[in-house]
Image (spheres, rainbow, N blue to C red):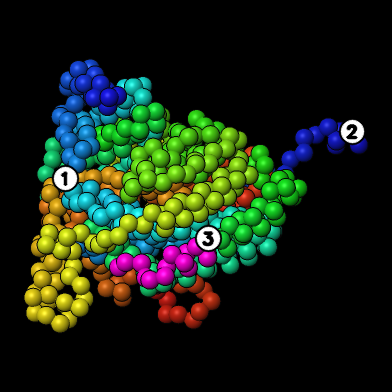
């Protein structure tokens, strides 16, 4: 009930940001433009979707979609036990969208994870640094154009000199 | 002397490295703490030491192969991960499994929950210096792991589910073994509660420590026993039942204060409720197959047929070949389940090929851990193991 009402209300209120709504396996998916995600999610939160269950991203390189990246937000309403997926589309040239950390604190780490693995920038995030990979890591591993196999031979990696062992000095 | 006494007492700020290899972190996570005397003023958790790219690996494996990866995420209750992943894949492919499969899955999930909670409570106790409770819990957990070994063949990397069913049925006489272990667990839970519930030291170390308010719990995405200890009446088994949980009669444990003690109480009560669910599932266990209809062409044929008949071999080959066998429609499915730590969700996006386009785990450990720095600030250093223990962070799931 709440879900249908909310979706109709959102579509009416934001005709420009909302691209379409689809349904798959009984679940509603709301597709929106990346730049307007904060306004849409603020409205959804005010409408009763009080819990951000999950935040992740999909690289649409070969899947197809409105843009290269889609950031998925899985919302939950504790009162009516209804769930809604919101997908925000972000272009390849400028992969950035507003952070929702101001609405839910859980977005802090999850947005860092998406930044780390996909290279998507969240504007207004207080501390957007890598979370899984080391700070000096190059590339974003979950992008579809990132190779699944190793890129170098073992011998190409630098040897860390620990000072205790007698080792050949590395470059 | 007066001019000395009137000056504020100040100590140098000290930076303490907690982990990555510290007995109280139970896995590889690093916490950089800034201390003012013994009071923690600022905390920077650093994670990712166990990051193994499970989500990237999933894009290269087919739907059944990925089940072996899910074992390695939460390695204390791998069966819950297996079930959650299988449910997501089944939703994507619109498969309906038999009632017997669902009941066995419930039985296994609840046994895992008991084992997970026993270990968590035991570890919390041993970090605070109470060795006996830990040993009692570990002894009972070992018997539950023996049950897993009987049913799945392994203790830890169970890989028990398949998309559309189970790897094998439970062995004969399994129900008697389970009932025996459940009686033992009941006694052990009593023993642990006798040791801790009215223990003055335990109260001093856990009460009013690491309080999570209701608002914070929702804002930080906290779920599972931690959310219920903060007074949120939300259990996915009851509110959004999956795998026939609606057939079982059990209560949801809720506490109101949200401190370490309440999280302990909720976990102990959940052990008792899980025992109840296990008994009911054994009582009502339906008969039937534990795998979907083989004529659908989605399940592997029995090993007997593969080895002894050419048709079976061809059929097996067909299913395991790339771009054959299990090919779901283009779409996506997110399935939330109630794991011992909280909401464990699998989000699978498919492009119609035989391996998922993207497979994402909603890790309860990562999301529950993100509140840690807020909880510990202002507390004493010695409260860090208590708070960390009550969050039940599993490094495999935290970093994936």
Q: Nearer the viewer, mark 2 or mark 3?
A: 3
Label 1 neighbour load within 10 Å: few <14, some 14-19, many 20+: some
Q: Which of marks 1 and 3 is in front?
A: 3
Residue A171, compared with residue B332, is above or below; it is below
User: Which badge, 2 or 3, is on the more N-terminal residue?
Assistant: 2
Which residue is nearer to you in this view: B227 or B220?
A: B227
Residue A65's x, y, as percent? 13, 40
Residue B146's x, y, as percent? 47, 71
Q: Residue at x 17, y 60 (%)?
A: B293
Secondary structure type for disc 1: strand
Label 3 neighbour load within 10 Å: few <14, some 14-19, many 20+: many
Query: Taking the image as drawn, is residue B237 in sight?
Result: yes
Residue A32, compared with residue B312, is above or below; it is above
Give the residue number, with chain letter if any, for mark 1: B331
Give the residue number, with chain letter if any, for mark 3: B182
Secondary structure type for disc 3: helix
Which residue is nearer to you in this view: B374 or B218?
A: B218
Q: Do the residues bearing badges 2 and 3 touch, measured as CB atoms within 8 Å?
A: no
The magenta-colored residue range is B168-181
User: Which badge, 1 or 3, is on the more N-terminal residue?
Assistant: 3
Q: Residue at x 13, y 47 (%)?
A: B330
């Amino acid at each position: 009930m709440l879900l249908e009402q909310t979706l109709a209300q959102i579509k009416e209120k934001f005709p420009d940001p909302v691209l379409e709504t689809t349904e798959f396996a009984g679940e509603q998916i709301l597709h929106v433009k990346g730049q307007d995600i904060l306004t849409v999610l603020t409205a959804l939160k005010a409408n009763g979707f009080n819990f951000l269950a999950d935040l992740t991203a999909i690289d649409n390189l070969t899947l197809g979609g409105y843009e290269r990246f889609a950031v998925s937000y899985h919302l939950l309403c504790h009162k009516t036990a209804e769930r809604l997926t919101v997908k925000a589309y972000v272009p390849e040239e400028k992969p950035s969208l507003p952070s929702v950390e101001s609405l839910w604190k859980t977005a802090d780490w999850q947005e860092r994870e998406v930044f780390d693995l996909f290279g998507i920038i969240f504007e207004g995030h207080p501390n957007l640094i890598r979370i899984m990979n080391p700070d000096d890591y190059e590339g974003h591993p979950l992008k579809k154009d990132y190779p699944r196999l190793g890129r170098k031979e073992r011998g190409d990696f630098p040897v860390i000199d620990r000072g205790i062992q007698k080792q050949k000095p590395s470059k | 002397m007066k001019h000395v006494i009137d000056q504020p007492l100040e100590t140098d700020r000290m930076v303490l490295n907690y982990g990555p290899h510290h007995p109280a972190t139970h896995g590889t996570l690093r916490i950089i703490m800034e201390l003012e005397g013994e009071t923690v003023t600022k905390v920077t958790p650093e994670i990712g030491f166990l990051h193994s790219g499970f989500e990237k690996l999933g894009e290269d494996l087919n739907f059944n192969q990925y089940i072996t990866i899910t074992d390695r995420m939460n390695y204390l209750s791998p069966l819950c991960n297996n079930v959650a992943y299988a449910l997501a894949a089944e939703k994507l492919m619109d498969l309906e499994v038999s009632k017997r499969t669902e009941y066995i899955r419930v039985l296994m999930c609840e046994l895992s929950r008991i084992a997970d909670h026993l270990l968590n409570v035991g570890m919390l106790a041993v970090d605070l210096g109470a060795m006996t409770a830990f040993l009692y819990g570990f002894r009972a957990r070992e018997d539950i792991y023996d049950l897993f070994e009987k049913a799945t063949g392994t203790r830890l990397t169970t890989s028990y589910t398949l998309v559309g069913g189970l790897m094998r049925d439970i062995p004969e006489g399994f129900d008697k073994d389970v009932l025996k272990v459940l009686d033992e667990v009941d006694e052990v839970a009593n023993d642990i509660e006798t040791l801790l519930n009215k223990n003055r030291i335990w109260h001093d170390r856990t009460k009013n420590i690491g309080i999570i308010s209701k608002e914070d719990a929702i804002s930080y995405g906290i779920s599972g026993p931690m959310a219920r200890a903060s007074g949120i009446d939300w259990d996915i088994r009851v509110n959004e039942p999956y795998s026939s949980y609606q057939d079982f009669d059990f209560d949801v444990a809720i506490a109101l204060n949200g401190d370490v003690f309440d999280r302990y109480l909720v976990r102990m009560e959940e052990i008792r409720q899980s025992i109840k669910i296990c008994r009911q599932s054994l009582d009502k266990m339906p008969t039937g197959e534990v795998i979907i209809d083989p004529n659908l062409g989605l399940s592997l044929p029995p090993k007997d047929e593969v080895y002894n008949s050419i048709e079976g071999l061809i059929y097996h080959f067909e299913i395991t070949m790339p771009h054959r066998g299990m090919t779901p429609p283009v779409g996506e499915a997110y399935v939330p389940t109630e794991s011992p730590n909280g909401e464990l969700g699998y989000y699978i996006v498919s492009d119609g090929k035989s391996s998922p386009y993207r497979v994402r785990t909603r890790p309860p450990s990562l999301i529950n851990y993100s509140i840690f720095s807020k909880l510990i600030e202002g507390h004493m250093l010695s409260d860090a193991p208590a708070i960390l223990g009550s969050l039940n962070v599993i490094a495999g799931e935290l970093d994936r």
